[in-house]
């Protein structure tokens, strides 16, 4: 998948340089961030290669040639254009409420002074909702992997996250949590504007670019790309089995990721059909006999399923014994990645740790 080129144009050189650098370094597989502090340098770029998306600071609207590029004349009225194939998708970095000049008030806006990650999510939300972006090339997904714990082990998700990070050292992995109470907001001290239900709705009810839909809500932690889990877990049981299957197939075929890793909670509608769509499924338990009864019940249920062949896809894993230590925010994930669970996941994925 080719990188999406995002140009940050701002006369505040320190701000623009930091944002452009973050876009490139934090998301180097997907995005290429550029920075321009004056019109002449930006015009040279436009003459040689047009960016996909341009973020305009207030100072850039004061350049006459910038305004000429951004506007078209219709009688005595200036109107903003964001629909020509040879133009990038323009957005305005808004510093204050209502500061947008009247002549370009239709220009979509992004609040300037917030986290870089939040800016990027709002950029793609606008890009998708306006529907003016050029179609981007995507590579087809290669594999769907499922992770499920019949006894609902609390260590299932730490394993799934560390395994996603390990697999991501070789291939592009998208982690999708299907649990009704995933706990991400509390664990990682992160507030999400969009979650999995929003992305499912967009992908299933609109003729949209799936990559753009995913990017509009995409988060990254320690190299793990993920869609935020649902806030209202009760809705998961109300989605049809066909919608689940269609959505997962769309992610595999059109999201641009090589691997879609599904972290299951409850048995969703069409649960066994989804497992059948996976190339491999890891059924995980914790050490000790308390997990044996749920595992045996799952095996009996699976054996009774008609017309579904899962035997060769299922791999049964006993997760390593873990000690519970409190670590706030992202330090919790780092504890899992570089502790016993991370070592276990890297061995399973066939990769070495950074310290080996």
Image (cartoon, grey):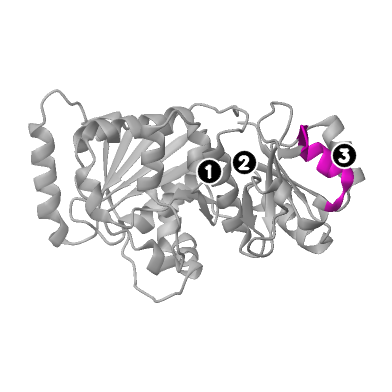
Q: In this view, which residue lies farthest toward the front?
A: 76
Marked residue nearer the N-terminal end (3 or 2): 2
Marked residue nearer the N-terminal end (1 or 2): 2
Q: What element carries label 1?
A: helix
Q: In this view, does 317 lie above or below 185?
A: above
Residue 43 bears which disc, if any? 3
Residue 74 in magenta stretch: yes
Q: Distance between the residues labelled 3 and 2?
A: 24 Å
Mark 1 — residue? Answer: 215
Question: Residue, x 48% and y 49% (percent of image)?
Answer: 217
Marked residue nearer the N-terminal end (1 or 3): 3
Depth-wise, is mark 1 or mark 2 nearer the camera?
1
Side (left or right) of 316 relative to 219: left
Measured as percent of width and height from the top left, residue 100 is found at 69, 55
| Residue 31 occupies quadrant | top right
- For the record, the magenta segment spans 62-76
Mark 2 — residue? Answer: 30
Depth-wise, is mark 1 or mark 3 nearer the camera?
3
Residue 275 bears which disc, if any? none
| Residue 273 occupies quadrant | top left
Question: Residue, x 7% and y 33% (percent of image)?
Answer: 304
Q: Is residue 42 above or below residue 153?
A: above
Residue 288 in magenta stretch: no
Q: Residues within 10 Å of mark 1 (few under 14, many from 20)?
A: many
Residue 257 appears in the picture as rendered: no
Q: Are marks 1 and 2 in contact (CB under 8 Å)?
A: yes
Measured as percent of width and height from the top left, residue 7 is found at 75, 45
Q: Is mark 2 on a helix, strand or loop?
A: loop
Side (left or right) of 260 relative to 267: right
């Amino acid at each position: 998948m080719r990188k999406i080129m995002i140009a940050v144009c701002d006369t505040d050189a320190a701000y623009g340089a930091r944002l452009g650098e973050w876009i490139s370094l934090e998301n180097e597989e997907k995005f290429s961030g550029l920075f321009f502090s004056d019109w002449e340098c930006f015009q040279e770029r436009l003459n040689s290669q047009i960016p996909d998306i341009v973020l305009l600071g207030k100072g850039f609207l004061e350049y006459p040639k910038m305004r000429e590029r951004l506007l078209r004349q219709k009688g005595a009225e200036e109107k903003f254009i964001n629909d020509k194939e040879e133009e990038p998708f323009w957005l305005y970095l808004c510093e204050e409420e209502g500061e947008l000049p009247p002549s370009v008030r239709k220009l979509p806006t992004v609040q300037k002074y917030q986290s870089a990650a939040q800016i990027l999510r709002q950029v793609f939300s606008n890009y998708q909702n306006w529907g003016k972006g050029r179609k981007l090339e995507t590579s087809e997904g290669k594999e769907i992997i499922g992770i499920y714990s019949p006894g609902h082990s609390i260590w299932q998700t730490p394993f799934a996250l560390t395994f996603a990070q390990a697999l991501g050292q070789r291939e592009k992995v998208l982690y999708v949590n299907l649990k009704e109470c995933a706990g991400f907001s509390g664990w990682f001290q992160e507030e999400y504007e969009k979650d999995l239900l929003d992305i499912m709705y967009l992908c299933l009810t609109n003729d949209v670019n799936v990559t753009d839909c995913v990017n509009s809500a995409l988060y990254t932690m320690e190299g793990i790309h993920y869609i935020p889990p649902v806030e209202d877990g009760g809705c998961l049981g109300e989605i049809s089995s066909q919608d689940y299957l269609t959505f997962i197939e769309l992610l595999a075929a059109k999201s641009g990721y090589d691997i879609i890793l599904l972290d299951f909670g409850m048995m969703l509608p069409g649960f066994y059909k989804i497992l059948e769509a996976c190339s491999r499924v890891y059924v995980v338990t914790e050490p000790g006999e308390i997990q044996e009864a749920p595992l045996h019940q799952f095996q009996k249920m699976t054996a009774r399923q008609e017309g579904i062949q899962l035997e060769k896809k299922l791999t049964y894993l006993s997760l390593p014994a873990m000690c519970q230590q409190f670590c706030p925010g992202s330090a919790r994930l780092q504890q899992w990645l570089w502790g016993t669970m991370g070592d276990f996941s890297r061995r399973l994925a066939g990769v070495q740790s950074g310290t080996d």
